[in-house]
Image: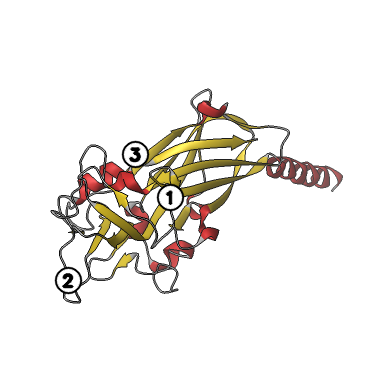
Protein backbone atom coordinates (compact mmCIF):
# COMPACT_ATOMS: atom_id res chain seq x y z
CA UNK A 1 0.00 0.00 0.00
CA UNK A 2 2.84 2.42 0.85
CA UNK A 3 4.64 1.74 -2.44
CA UNK A 4 1.43 2.34 -4.41
CA UNK A 5 0.86 5.64 -2.64
CA UNK A 6 4.41 6.81 -3.46
CA UNK A 7 3.89 6.03 -7.13
CA UNK A 8 0.69 8.04 -7.21
CA UNK A 9 2.30 11.08 -5.55
CA UNK A 10 5.27 11.01 -7.91
CA UNK A 11 2.89 10.80 -10.86
CA UNK A 12 0.98 13.88 -9.75
CA UNK A 13 4.20 15.79 -9.15
CA UNK A 14 5.47 15.01 -12.67
CA UNK A 15 2.16 16.09 -14.15
CA UNK A 16 2.25 19.37 -12.24
CA UNK A 17 5.79 19.99 -13.45
CA UNK A 18 4.68 19.37 -17.05
CA UNK A 19 1.81 21.85 -16.66
CA UNK A 20 4.18 24.43 -15.16
CA UNK A 21 6.41 24.22 -18.23
CA UNK A 22 3.59 25.39 -20.47
CA UNK A 23 3.74 29.15 -21.01
CA UNK A 24 0.97 31.47 -22.15
CA UNK A 25 1.58 33.00 -25.57
CA UNK A 26 -0.51 35.64 -27.29
CA UNK A 27 -0.31 36.06 -31.05
CA UNK A 28 -1.62 39.55 -31.81
CA UNK A 29 -2.38 40.73 -35.36
CA UNK A 30 -2.67 44.39 -36.31
CA UNK A 31 -4.55 44.92 -39.55
CA UNK A 32 -3.02 47.72 -41.58
CA UNK A 33 -3.24 49.07 -45.11
CA UNK A 34 -0.37 50.79 -46.84
CA UNK A 35 1.40 51.10 -43.48
CA UNK A 36 -1.52 52.72 -41.63
CA UNK A 37 -4.05 51.13 -39.25
CA UNK A 38 -6.95 49.67 -41.23
CA UNK A 39 -10.15 51.53 -40.38
CA UNK A 40 -13.14 50.09 -42.19
CA UNK A 41 -15.28 52.42 -44.30
CA UNK A 42 -12.58 55.07 -44.10
CA UNK A 43 -9.81 56.35 -46.35
CA UNK A 44 -9.13 56.06 -50.05
CA UNK A 45 -6.24 53.90 -51.19
CA UNK A 46 -4.65 53.23 -54.56
CA UNK A 47 -3.71 49.72 -55.69
CA UNK A 48 -0.97 48.76 -58.14
CA UNK A 49 -3.51 48.95 -60.95
CA UNK A 50 -3.93 52.68 -60.12
CA UNK A 51 -7.48 52.17 -58.87
CA UNK A 52 -8.90 53.85 -55.77
CA UNK A 53 -10.73 51.81 -53.16
CA UNK A 54 -12.05 51.75 -49.59
CA UNK A 55 -12.24 48.58 -47.51
CA UNK A 56 -15.54 47.82 -45.76
CA UNK A 57 -14.96 44.20 -44.65
CA UNK A 58 -11.75 42.34 -43.82
CA UNK A 59 -12.01 38.90 -42.19
CA UNK A 60 -9.83 35.78 -42.32
CA UNK A 61 -9.16 32.51 -40.51
CA UNK A 62 -5.90 31.65 -38.77
CA UNK A 63 -5.43 27.98 -37.85
CA UNK A 64 -2.97 25.14 -37.24
CA UNK A 65 -0.44 27.26 -35.36
CA UNK A 66 3.02 25.80 -34.75
CA UNK A 67 6.39 27.05 -33.51
CA UNK A 68 9.86 25.85 -34.51
CA UNK A 69 12.73 26.04 -32.06
CA UNK A 70 16.39 26.80 -32.74
CA UNK A 71 17.13 23.10 -33.16
CA UNK A 72 14.42 22.61 -35.77
CA UNK A 73 11.94 20.85 -33.48
CA UNK A 74 8.33 21.76 -34.19
CA UNK A 75 5.68 22.21 -31.52
CA UNK A 76 2.11 22.06 -32.83
CA UNK A 77 -0.48 23.88 -30.76
CA UNK A 78 -3.25 21.33 -30.01
CA UNK A 79 -5.55 21.52 -32.98
CA UNK A 80 -8.72 22.07 -30.98
CA UNK A 81 -7.11 25.23 -29.57
CA UNK A 82 -5.83 26.44 -32.91
CA UNK A 83 -8.72 27.97 -34.89
CA UNK A 84 -9.30 31.71 -34.84
CA UNK A 85 -11.37 34.15 -36.88
CA UNK A 86 -9.83 37.57 -37.35
CA UNK A 87 -12.30 40.39 -37.98
CA UNK A 88 -11.18 43.95 -38.57
CA UNK A 89 -14.56 45.04 -37.21
CA UNK A 90 -13.85 43.38 -33.85
CA UNK A 91 -10.68 44.45 -32.02
CA UNK A 92 -11.06 41.61 -29.50
CA UNK A 93 -10.38 39.06 -32.23
CA UNK A 94 -6.84 40.41 -32.68
CA UNK A 95 -5.49 38.38 -29.74
CA UNK A 96 -5.09 34.63 -30.16
CA UNK A 97 -4.07 32.85 -26.95
CA UNK A 98 -2.52 29.40 -26.51
CA UNK A 99 0.14 27.62 -24.46
CA UNK A 100 3.62 26.56 -25.57
CA UNK A 101 6.34 24.57 -23.73
CA UNK A 102 9.55 26.20 -22.57
CA UNK A 103 11.97 26.70 -25.43
CA UNK A 104 13.84 29.07 -27.69
CA UNK A 105 11.71 29.50 -30.81
CA UNK A 106 12.89 30.93 -34.11
CA UNK A 107 9.65 30.99 -36.13
CA UNK A 108 5.88 30.72 -35.95
CA UNK A 109 3.77 29.16 -38.68
CA UNK A 110 0.05 28.96 -39.37
CA UNK A 111 -2.52 28.36 -42.06
CA UNK A 112 -4.69 31.07 -43.57
CA UNK A 113 -7.93 29.17 -43.80
CA UNK A 114 -9.30 25.91 -42.42
CA UNK A 115 -7.65 22.57 -43.18
CA UNK A 116 -9.53 19.90 -45.12
CA UNK A 117 -9.89 17.47 -42.20
CA UNK A 118 -11.60 20.02 -39.96
CA UNK A 119 -13.61 21.43 -42.87
CA UNK A 120 -15.14 18.00 -43.43
CA UNK A 121 -15.29 16.88 -39.78
CA UNK A 122 -18.55 16.23 -37.99
CA UNK A 123 -20.23 19.46 -36.93
CA UNK A 124 -19.69 18.49 -33.29
CA UNK A 125 -15.95 19.02 -33.81
CA UNK A 126 -16.43 22.43 -35.41
CA UNK A 127 -16.98 24.67 -32.43
CA UNK A 128 -15.88 28.15 -31.36
CA UNK A 129 -14.71 30.14 -34.37
CA UNK A 130 -15.81 27.28 -36.66
CA UNK A 131 -19.37 26.97 -35.34
CA UNK A 132 -21.54 27.29 -38.42
CA UNK A 133 -24.72 27.45 -36.34
CA UNK A 134 -23.65 29.79 -33.57
CA UNK A 135 -23.71 33.09 -35.42
CA UNK A 136 -19.98 33.67 -34.92
CA UNK A 137 -19.01 33.28 -38.56
CA UNK A 138 -20.92 36.30 -39.87
CA UNK A 139 -20.99 35.13 -43.46
CA UNK A 140 -17.68 33.24 -43.44
CA UNK A 141 -19.24 29.94 -44.60
CA UNK A 142 -20.63 28.91 -47.97
CA UNK A 143 -23.76 26.87 -47.30
CA UNK A 144 -24.09 26.23 -51.03
CA UNK A 145 -20.51 24.94 -51.24
CA UNK A 146 -20.17 23.43 -47.74
CA UNK A 147 -16.97 25.21 -46.95
CA UNK A 148 -15.40 28.05 -44.99
CA UNK A 149 -14.44 31.33 -46.60
CA UNK A 150 -10.78 31.65 -45.69
CA UNK A 151 -10.55 35.38 -46.38
CA UNK A 152 -13.25 37.92 -47.11
CA UNK A 153 -12.35 41.39 -48.31
CA UNK A 154 -15.05 43.75 -49.53
CA UNK A 155 -15.15 47.42 -50.37
CA UNK A 156 -16.13 50.15 -52.77
CA UNK A 157 -14.24 51.53 -55.73
CA UNK A 158 -15.05 53.97 -58.51
CA UNK A 159 -13.50 51.48 -60.90
CA UNK A 160 -15.93 48.69 -59.91
CA UNK A 161 -19.02 48.29 -62.11
CA UNK A 162 -22.25 49.51 -60.55
CA UNK A 163 -24.57 46.84 -59.21
CA UNK A 164 -28.37 46.87 -59.40
CA UNK A 165 -28.54 49.39 -56.56
CA UNK A 166 -26.03 51.69 -58.23
CA UNK A 167 -23.27 50.89 -55.73
CA UNK A 168 -19.76 50.22 -56.98
CA UNK A 169 -18.59 47.34 -54.83
CA UNK A 170 -15.89 44.69 -55.02
CA UNK A 171 -16.05 41.36 -53.21
CA UNK A 172 -13.26 38.82 -52.71
CA UNK A 173 -14.46 35.68 -50.92
CA UNK A 174 -11.61 33.17 -51.08
CA UNK A 175 -11.96 29.57 -49.94
CA UNK A 176 -11.59 26.00 -51.15
CA UNK A 177 -9.86 23.19 -49.22
CA UNK A 178 -9.16 20.84 -52.12
CA UNK A 179 -12.47 19.05 -52.50
CA UNK A 180 -14.52 16.62 -50.43
CA UNK A 181 -15.04 13.64 -52.73
CA UNK A 182 -13.06 14.79 -55.77
CA UNK A 183 -10.15 17.21 -56.39
CA UNK A 184 -11.15 20.86 -56.41
CA UNK A 185 -9.69 24.31 -55.80
CA UNK A 186 -7.24 24.36 -52.90
CA UNK A 187 -6.60 27.83 -51.51
CA UNK A 188 -5.15 26.77 -48.17
CA UNK A 189 -1.95 28.77 -47.70
CA UNK A 190 0.86 28.27 -45.19
CA UNK A 191 2.63 31.24 -43.60
CA UNK A 192 5.88 31.27 -41.63
CA UNK A 193 7.07 34.37 -39.78
CA UNK A 194 10.75 34.55 -38.79
CA UNK A 195 10.99 35.53 -35.12
CA UNK A 196 14.77 35.91 -35.24
CA UNK A 197 14.25 39.39 -36.69
CA UNK A 198 13.37 40.48 -33.15
CA UNK A 199 15.66 38.14 -31.22
CA UNK A 200 13.39 35.08 -31.22
CA UNK A 201 10.86 33.86 -28.67
CA UNK A 202 12.52 32.70 -25.45
CA UNK A 203 10.16 30.89 -23.11
CA UNK A 204 12.12 30.21 -19.97
CA UNK A 205 11.72 31.87 -16.59
CA UNK A 206 8.70 33.81 -17.84
CA UNK A 207 5.00 33.08 -17.48
CA UNK A 208 3.84 34.66 -20.71
CA UNK A 209 4.97 36.18 -24.00
CA UNK A 210 3.48 38.13 -26.89
CA UNK A 211 4.14 38.08 -30.61
CA UNK A 212 2.82 41.01 -32.65
CA UNK A 213 2.56 40.76 -36.40
CA UNK A 214 0.74 42.90 -38.91
CA UNK A 215 -1.40 42.01 -41.89
CA UNK A 216 -1.40 44.50 -44.77
CA UNK A 217 -4.76 44.41 -46.56
CA UNK A 218 -3.27 46.24 -49.55
CA UNK A 219 -1.27 43.12 -50.39
CA UNK A 220 -4.44 41.20 -51.16
CA UNK A 221 -4.47 43.21 -54.38
CA UNK A 222 -0.73 43.19 -54.99
CA UNK A 223 2.16 40.78 -55.06
CA UNK A 224 2.78 38.00 -57.52
CA UNK A 225 -0.42 39.09 -59.26
CA UNK A 226 -1.69 42.66 -59.62
CA UNK A 227 -5.44 42.53 -59.03
CA UNK A 228 -7.52 44.99 -61.04
CA UNK A 229 -10.84 45.79 -59.39
CA UNK A 230 -12.29 46.85 -62.75
CA UNK A 231 -11.40 43.51 -64.33
CA UNK A 232 -12.11 41.36 -61.28
CA UNK A 233 -14.74 43.07 -59.11
CA UNK A 234 -15.99 39.76 -57.69
CA UNK A 235 -13.81 36.72 -57.09
CA UNK A 236 -15.14 33.68 -55.29
CA UNK A 237 -14.85 30.01 -56.22
CA UNK A 238 -12.88 30.28 -59.45
CA UNK A 239 -9.39 29.84 -60.84
CA UNK A 240 -8.37 33.45 -60.17
CA UNK A 241 -9.03 32.95 -56.46
CA UNK A 242 -5.72 31.11 -56.20
CA UNK A 243 -3.84 34.18 -57.37
CA UNK A 244 -5.44 36.27 -54.65
CA UNK A 245 -4.63 33.59 -52.07
CA UNK A 246 -0.99 33.67 -53.19
CA UNK A 247 -1.01 37.43 -52.71
CA UNK A 248 -2.46 37.49 -49.20
CA UNK A 249 -0.16 34.70 -48.02
CA UNK A 250 2.57 37.38 -48.16
CA UNK A 251 0.70 40.06 -46.22
CA UNK A 252 2.13 39.18 -42.78
CA UNK A 253 5.25 40.71 -41.21
CA UNK A 254 6.75 40.71 -37.72
CA UNK A 255 6.40 43.79 -35.51
CA UNK A 256 7.74 42.69 -32.12
CA UNK A 257 8.36 39.84 -29.69
CA UNK A 258 7.93 40.40 -25.96
CA UNK A 259 9.39 37.65 -23.79
Residues at marks 3 and 2, CA–CA distance in whole angstroms: 31 Å
Residues at marks 3 and 1, CA–CA distance in whole angstroms: 16 Å
Closest to the observer: 203 or 183? 203
Badge 2 local density, few (<14 within 10 Å), some, or many (20+)?
A: few
* Residue identified by numbered label 3: 250
Residue 2 position in % (x across, y down)? 86, 45
- Is residue 188 at all visible to an observer of this figure? no
Q: Which label lies toward us, 1 or 2?
A: 2
Q: Secondary structure at mark 2?
A: loop
Residue 199 position in % (x across, y down)? 57, 26
- Is residue 58 at all visible to an observer of this figure? yes
Of the image marks 3 and 1, the number of the one nearer the N terminus? 1
* Residue identified by numbered label 2: 163
- Specify the label residue 97 is tagged with: none
Badge 1 local density, few (<14 within 10 Å), some, or many (20+)?
A: many
Point 54% across, 45% down: residue: 27
Q: Is residue 229 left or right of residue 129?
A: left
Residue 173 position in % (x across, y down)? 27, 59
Q: Secondary structure at mark 3?
A: loop
Q: Which label lies toward us, 3 or 2?
A: 2
Point 77% across, 43% down: residue: 13
Of the image marks 3 and 2, the number of the one nearer the N terminus? 2
- Specify the label residue 63 is tagged with: 1
Question: How many numbered discs, if any?
Answer: 3
Of the image marks 1 and 2, the number of the one nearer the N terminus? 1
Q: Which label lies toward us, 3 or 1?
A: 3
Amino acid sequence: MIKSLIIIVVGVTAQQKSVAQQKNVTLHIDNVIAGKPLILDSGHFVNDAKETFTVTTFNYFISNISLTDKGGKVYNVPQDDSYFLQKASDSTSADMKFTVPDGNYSSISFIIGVDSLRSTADISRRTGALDIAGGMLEGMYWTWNSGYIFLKMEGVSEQAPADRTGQKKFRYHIGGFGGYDKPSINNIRNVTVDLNEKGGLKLSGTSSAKIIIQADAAKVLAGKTTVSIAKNPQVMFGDFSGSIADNYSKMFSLVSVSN
